[in-house]
């Protein structure tokens, strides 16, 4: 292919489109199920199937620890994993801005290939559109994943029970912090990389160790804090957090201290929140510590019957403050 | 023979739990009046039968010689036709009638009881719960009215025969004294988790304190943490355990002489110190500036109130507190004890054993408790003085829930949830407003729980069913959440407007005023943060006439603790570019280059940044710029340090009042033009605080004495406020100003503004018994709610 950048012709459906698909996408995504026809024809799973779709827009598209390609696989695969589903198939649709460097597109496709392989998922169908300059920012990717629900585990946001331990599979807020630093040019040289990772392997290990799990939820946009509020609401339970137990990387802690931000509200792309009976918690954490993306897993709190719908944080000096509700402006309250 | 008449008298006010009925009975007997007296809950009802002259004399006796602790607010007299013949004068046991209710605050031990307590021949010798009709616990033990033993937490303690005799005999000081008890009956002190009870428990507690340890002690309204205030080591240990590096500790002195040895005490202050309310008084330490700062009195260790020219002092008010100083066990005790609230950071003061064990065990060496239950917490009140008059900082024990009355003939019932920090709430009934005892900082959910509980309790005590609930406008206040949960119609009142309303209500002012609301932060009606506001206000509503110059407050709540962040933002606003900001910031040693870059980026890009006119933050920022305090370990620390530095300069011989003030930093007229391109309704005037900051920054960079600049800051800000009020007067014709908001705890600013405004012919309303800080806004909210009810419903 001669072009160094993506042109409108790449999206017109003609020769150049085929070239782009063959040389960039097919070269990376090749597998027996990848279709050249209008639709992929697949063998359905034997049990129930989980389907999830997500659109990915991230600025910048390349960041320490990953890029939009890796993110687009992880995001969807992790959504499936949270339902206890082993990811099987994935489709992807690209919207690319005219003028986007071909080399970068290659890099994105290559990251997708690698991540898909690791997650054990096959990319089976795709679509490519080119948008005029300025109509999109770089590249947008939408992925849809299909997975097979594994027998025996029933998890859901409404299933948290008072007495459950709350586990987070690693340090929080790294993706959000990484993006913020990459985007805003604060001139901070903090050693922070995105936590972006595919987590099916991790979830499987946990499920193999115990079936007694009530909630698995990946903390993406809105961070762990938002997930906790969602579950407190869905299950109508209270959540008590021990602030000192929440793992935060030193770099993230430094940046948050500087900006006055709460790491629990920064996005993650490779972190799960797990709620399970206390009796199972130690075992789960032990398993997590052996998995590649959850070396820092920790029990950070418990589910309570009082204060339903609220997340209460016991701080290091012993105050019991409500974790601010997600959303809304960050407004000073101290008079 | 002179004609016999009968009259019915109703007495309203604090007439319960203060020995009112026995006093009335004595007056009646002295004049040969027959009839009866009974407690009706809201009032005392008296029938007086006798010769006309005697009845009238009896009535004036009641008015002129009521019991010591009573406060008569209203006395109604009606003639009774066809009255039955009374044989004698009877005291009738309580029955209930609905209506106006006054609950007495707790009353410090009286002189007679104190004497008895230390009289080895008295049967209450060293009795830790001694009380009588004119002293002892009231609000804190009360379940409901009327005030009778079975409706208090004394219910579970049957009286011994001797106490019962006194209780029933109108000739004793304990006639009808509900909490009466003695060494043979009533509650007992004990150490939690140890075997010592009674005398041994007190001795052990004294031993712990005398040997430098820390004791938790249950008093009237909750637990205190107590240690030797003369031992630096003991106080430092308490600081470490309580995680309270700098915030001053209150001190309890054994007697007035001891206070006078360490502090300056004016006549008015002496009256308050020894009075029956016994607040913590903020007094000037006796030893003065020594060039480097303030020196301590040899008796008081430096760590009590580090770097602070004042110290908070109170005298003992509960019998057990006297016993800590004086007992017959041969232990030598210090004359000064630390008496700080017994709570973990953020939580309300502990009031029962369970809470004490949970929260205080790790902070102390022993816990001295007792089994008389505390129904409502009452923290110690804290009071400053301004021009010979009380200036309340925290209104609680001894004062709450005494009502404030306004003359507006309102009717209805409201409850106001108050602010977020230093929360108190307020119940309004017609023209009377009952501010609650201090609740605390609602950032902590245990305090939120205490707010809900105490609200319920006070509603029951006062027998009110509010029609509306009033709260702050801030979308993230826990007090607003509590207000919403009540399930009544909710009215939201802007924070700084509520401050002004509280000042108006305290001063019983109904007319429109120019409100100077200088405060920390509050949520504005435009979604930005306010705090240095000039408002035109009355009970209907307000207009924001002006404010200090808006700046960018970056970092949310953290900027309230780290004033250097505000300093960077203020400097950046003045210079308008990064290079100059970096230069100044580095020379002033405010932060690292990277921190400065980050803050400027945040301000520019509006990341976690809001527009703010907070005067409190301005003080913090200036304190940092002048190198006085870069950050605060407790609320207001940096601003207080700025005030102390300014006061030090004011008293310093280096000062030359002629040349000291700034060159006029621009005037309001100039600045009004700056906002001319703003929409009509936003064309408010802006105080020229930007220029003040510019001048201070430049002078400090040029090496000027920070104390001098601190003084100039106060003087110039006062000038600007006065100019703003003049401008407001020009626009509105109003010459009444009300000063409120936490910044007016700063007495130097208060004095400069107050005197300056008076010179310009303003009538100036100030706080006295309601705090200017957020502890006072509930009153303003309640008054707003009441005015609203009377405007819209009736
Ligand atoms: Fe305030
Ligand atoms: Mg999804
Ligand atoms: Zn007494
Ligand atoms: Zn007795």
Image (cartoon, coloured by chain):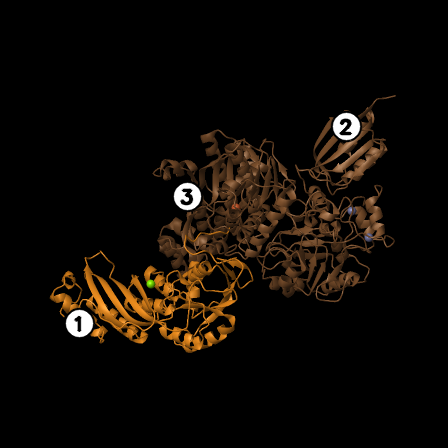
Quarter residue B758 falls in: top right
Whether residue A309 is situated above or below residue B483 in the rendered picture: below
Residue B418 percent location from the top left of the image: 55, 46
Q: In front: B246, or B401?
A: B401
Give the x, y percent position of residue B13: 69, 37
Residue A63 visible in image:
no
| Label 1: element kind | helix
Colour brown belongs to chain: B
- A150 versus B246 height, above or below: below
Pointer 3 and pointer 1: residues touching (CB < 8 Å)?
Answer: no
Which residue sits at x=47%, y=64%? Answer: A160
Element at badge 2? strand
Number of residues whose C-alpha sits closer than 10 Å to that of mark 1, classed few (under 14), some (14–19) or many (20 or more): few
Q: Judging from the image, what is the letter of the chain drawn in orange? A: A
Say which of marks 3 and 1 sits in front: 1
Which quarter of the picture shows residue B37? top right
Tag 1 residue: A23
User: Where does label 2 land, which residue?
Assistant: B7
Identify which residue, B293 or B129, lies in the foreground: B129
Query: At which x and y percent is residue A11?
Result: 16, 62
Q: Which mark is residue B526?
A: 3
The response on whether ligand 2 sits within 8 Å of label 1 is no
Q: Is residue B570 left or right of residue B383?
A: left
Asked if A84 appears above or below B306 in the picture, the reply is below
Q: Disc 2 versus disc 3: distance between alpha carbons? A: 60 Å
């Amino acid at each position: 292919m001669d072009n160094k950048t993506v042109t409108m012709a790449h999206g017109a459906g003609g020769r150049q489109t085929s070239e782009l698909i063959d040389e960039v996408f097919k070269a990376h995504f090749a597998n027996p199920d990848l279709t050249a026809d209008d639709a992929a024809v697949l063998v359905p799973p034997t049990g129930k199937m989980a389907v999830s779709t997500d659109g990915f827009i991230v600025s910048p598209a390349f960041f320490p620890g990953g890029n939009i390609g890796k993110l687009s696989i992880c995001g969807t695969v992790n959504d499936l994993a949270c339902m206890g589903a082993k990811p099987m198939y994935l489709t992807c649709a690209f919207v690319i801005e005219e003028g986007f460097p071909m080399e970068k597109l290659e890099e994105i496709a290559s990251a997708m290939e690698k991540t898909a392989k690791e997650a054990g998922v096959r990319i089976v169908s795709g679509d490519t559109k080119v948008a005029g300059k300025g109509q999109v920012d770089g590249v947008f990717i939408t992925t849809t994943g299909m997975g097979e629900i594994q027998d025996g585990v029933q998890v859901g946001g409404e299933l948290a029970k008072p007495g459950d331990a709350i586990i987070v599979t690693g340090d929080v807020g790294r993706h959000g912090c990484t993006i913020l630093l990459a985007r805003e040019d604060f001139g901070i040289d903090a050693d922070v990389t995105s936590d972006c990772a595919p987590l099916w392997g991790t979830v499987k290990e946990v499920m193999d160790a115990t079936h007694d799990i009530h909630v698995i939820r990946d903390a993406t946009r809105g961070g762990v804090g938002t997930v906790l509020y969602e579950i407190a609401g869905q299950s109508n339970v209270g959540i008590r957090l021990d602030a000192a137990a929440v793992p935060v990387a030193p770099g993230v802690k430094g940046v948050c201290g500087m900006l006055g931000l709460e790491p629990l509200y920064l996005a993650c792309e490779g972190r799960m929140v797990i709620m399970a009976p206390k009796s199972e918690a130690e075992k789960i954490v032990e398993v997590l510590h052996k998995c590649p993306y959850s070396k820092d897993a920790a029990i950070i709190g418990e589910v309570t019957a009082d204060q339903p719908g609220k997340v209460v944080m016991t701080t290091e000096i012993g105050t019991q403050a409500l974790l601010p509700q997600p959303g809304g402006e960050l407004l000073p309250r101290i008079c | 023979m002179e004609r016999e008449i009968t009259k019915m008298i109703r007495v309203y006010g604090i007439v319960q739990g203060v020995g009112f009925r026995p006093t009335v009975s004595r007056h009646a007997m002295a004049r040969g009046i027959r009839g009866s007296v009974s407690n009706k809950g809201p009032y005392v009802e008296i029938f007086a039968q006798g010769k006309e002259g005697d009845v009238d004399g009896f009535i004036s006796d009641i008015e002129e010689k009521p019991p010591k602790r009573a406060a008569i607010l209203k006395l109604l007299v009606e003639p009774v036709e066809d009255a039955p013949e009374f044989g004698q004068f009877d005291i009738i046991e309580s029955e209930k009638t609905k209506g106006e209710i006054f609950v007495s605050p707790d009353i410090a031990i009286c002189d007679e009881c104190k004497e008895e307590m230390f009289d080895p021949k008295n049967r209450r010798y060293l009795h830790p719960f001694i009380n009588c009709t004119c002293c002892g616990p009231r609000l804190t033990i009360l379940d409901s009215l009327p005030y009778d033993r079975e409706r208090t937490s004394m219910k579970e303690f049957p009286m011994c025969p001797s106490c019962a005799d006194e209780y029933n005999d109108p000739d004793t000081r304990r006639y009808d004294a509900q909490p009466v008890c003695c060494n043979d009956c009533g509650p007992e002190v004990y150490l939690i988790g140890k075997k010592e009870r009674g005398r041994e428990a007190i001795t052990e507690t004294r031993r712990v304190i005398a040997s430098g340890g820390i004791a938790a002690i249950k008093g009237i309204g909750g637990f205190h943490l107590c240690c030797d205030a003369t031992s630096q080591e003991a106080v430092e240990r308490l600081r470490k355990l309580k995680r309270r590096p700098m915030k001053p500790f209150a001190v309890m002195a054994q007697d007035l002489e001891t206070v006078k040895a360490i502090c300056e005490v004016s006549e008015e202050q002496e009256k308050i110190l020894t009075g029956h309310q016994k607040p913590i008084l903020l007094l000037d330490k006796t030893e003065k500036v020594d060039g480097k700062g303030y020196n301590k009195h040899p008796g008081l260790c430096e760590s009590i109130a580090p770097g602070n020219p004042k110290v908070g002092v109170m005298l003992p008010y509960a019998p057990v507190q006297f016993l800590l100083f004086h007992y017959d066990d041969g232990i030598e005790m210090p004359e000064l004890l630390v008496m700080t609230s017994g709570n973990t950071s953020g939580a309300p003061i502990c009031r029962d054993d369970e809470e004490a064990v949970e929260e205080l065990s790790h902070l102390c060496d022993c816990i001295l408790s007792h089994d008389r239950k505390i129904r409502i917490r009452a923290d110690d009140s804290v009071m400053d003085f301004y021009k010979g008059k009380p200036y309340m900082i925290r209104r609680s024990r001894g004062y709450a829930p005494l009502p404030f009355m306004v003359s507006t003939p309102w009717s209805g019932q409201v409850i106001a949830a108050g602010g977020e920090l230093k929360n108190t709430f307020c119940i309004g009934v017609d023209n009377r407003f009952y501010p609650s005892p201090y609740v605390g900082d609602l950032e902590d959910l245990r305090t939120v729980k205490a707010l809900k509980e105490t609200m319920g309790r006070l509603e029951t005590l006062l027998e009110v069913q509010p029609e509306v609930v009033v709260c702050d406008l801030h979308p993230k206040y826990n007090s607003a959440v509590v207000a919403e949960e009540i399930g009544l119609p909710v009215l939201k009142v802007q924070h700084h407007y509520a401050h002004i309303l509280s000042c108006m209500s305290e001063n019983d002012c109904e007319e429109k005023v120019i409100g100077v609301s200088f405060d920390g932060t509050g949520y504005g009606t435009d979604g930005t943060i306010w705090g240095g506001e000039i408002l035109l206000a009355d009970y209907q509503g307000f207009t924001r006439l002006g404010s200090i110059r808006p700046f960018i407050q970056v970092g949310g709540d953290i900027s309230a603790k780290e004033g250097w962040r505000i300093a960077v933002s203020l400097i950046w606003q003045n210079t308008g570019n990064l290079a100059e900001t970096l230069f100044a910031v580095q020379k002033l040693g405010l932060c690292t280059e990277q921190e400065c870059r980050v803050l400027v980026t945040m301000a520019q890009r509006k990341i976690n940044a809001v527009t703010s006119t907070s005067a409190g933050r301005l003080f913090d920022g200036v304190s940092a710029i002048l190198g006085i305090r870069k950050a605060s370990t407790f609320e207001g620390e940096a601003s207080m340090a700025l005030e102390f530095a300014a006061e030090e300069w004011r008293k310093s011989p280096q000062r030359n009042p002629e040349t000291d003030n700034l060159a006029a930093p621009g005037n309001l007229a100039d600045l009004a033009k700056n906002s001319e391109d703003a929409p009509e309704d936003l064309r408010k005037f802006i105080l020229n605080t930007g220029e003040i900051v510019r001048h201070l920054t430049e002078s400090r960079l040029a090496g000027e004495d920070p104390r001098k600049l601190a003084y100039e800051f106060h003087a110039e800000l006062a000038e600007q406020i006065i100019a703003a009020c003049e401008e407001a007067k020009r626009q509105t014709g109003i010459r009444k100003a009300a000063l409120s908001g936490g910044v007016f705890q700063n007495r130097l600013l208060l004095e400069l503004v107050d005197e300056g405004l008076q010179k310009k012919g303003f009538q100036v309303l100030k706080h006295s018994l309601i705090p200017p800080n957020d502890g006072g806004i509930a009153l303003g909210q309640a008054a707003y709610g009441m005015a609203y009810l009377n405007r819209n419903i009736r």
